[in-house]
Amino acid sequence: MVATPVKPATERKETILTPRFYTTDFAAMANMDIKGNQADYEAILQEFKADYNRRHFVRDQEFEQSWAHLDEKTKEHFRFFLESSCTSEFSGFLLYKEIAVRIKDKNPIVAECFNLMSRDEARHAGFLNKAMQDFDMVLDLSTLSKSKDYVYFAPKFIFYATYLSEKIGYWRYIKIHQHLAAHPENRIYPIFKFFESWCQDESRHGDFCNLLLRTDRKNVEGWQAKLWSRFFLLSVFATMYLNDLCNRKEFYEALGMNTEEYVVAVLKDTNRDSQKAFPVVLDLDNEEFWQRLRACIPSMNAINKIQSGDSPKLVKALQKLPHQLFLGWQFLRLFLMKPVECPKGVIL
Ligand SMILES: [Fe+2]
Ligand SMILES: [Fe+2]
């Protein structure tokens, strides 16, 4: 079907929860010493080369139909989901590709792993981009990469952040797939049947990021590693929780899901998985954690509403300030909550 573009996605407003693009210290990455873990790197490189999903991302006949029967609201929620997912996948592609190109002379094995991960992310982004056209939307990825601001992260912070975003991506995709496998009447668009194999790519990417993290033991041992682990776990978890509850609730409901139950399950599984990578994880069995996150929802909704209004910048900044202070206080209290120590053997 040929769709009429109604709205270029890049015209949409950015929020503090919009996916970002990243850059890093390529020279430091090129000089990473992997001798102590050489066999593990070679093993994971063989996994990437096997390319299990080589023939997976092919649109079949089920896509060849009109989606005009879906109501406008559902389509709008789909567009938002597809756009933010596509941007995240594309952001991964750009970062991994750039690292691969910049370090290939000095660190060829790690570079090849990044290169093959960028291959996977390009496939994911391309597949989502095609789906967007089914919903009358065009996302020009080449323009997007030029118009977005790049955020600098030192290599070890890239490793913490990408490990978590890959593993959380795995749990997000697999749980949607599992829900729709149990409730096929809610699978209103065929992209979801691709999620089961798709999420295996994300899991492999996460395992590689875990290997990058533990190549320097300082990233996974000692008090600084513990503080950074808590910081990244909380940042990624709070972002996903608030994004889903404040911006994507209707999308999950269109699939017959309970958004809060879904987010809680994804975060608990990601947190449990993270014991394999981090020296501490968050205590998600402590009800205070969820109470504080839930308390942030009205402030996040208020900020989004102010942001999308027509008031002058200064007025918006003043209106947002009390909500931002409230969120800052809740995040600080969440950060200071006692974490759970990971069993020593798990991170080896
Ligand atoms: Fe991906
Ligand atoms: Fe990935």
Image (tube, grey):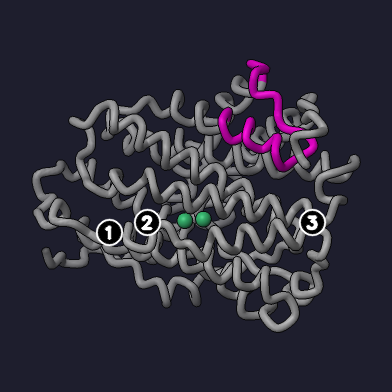
Q: Which mark is residue 132?
A: 1
- Residue that lies at the very extreme toward the bottom in this rendered image: 105
3D distance between C-alphas at marks 3 and 1: 39 Å
User: Which residue is located at x 9 percent, y 44 percent?
Assistant: 69
Q: Relative to 9, is 181 above or below?
A: above
Precedes in sequence: disc 1 or disc 2: 2
Residue ID for mark 3: 215
Viewer-side label of 3, 2: 3
Q: Earlier in the sequence, mark 3 or mark 2?
A: 2
Task: Provide the residue designation for mark 2.
Answer: 83
The spot of residue 271 in percent (x, y) is 63, 33
Give the label on residue 272, or none: none
Q: Are marks 1 and 2 in contact (CB under 8 Å)?
A: yes
**Boundaries of the magenta span:** 268-288
In the rendered image, which quarter is residue 295 located in?
A: top right
Q: Which residue shows up at 67% across the image and 17% down it?
A: 286
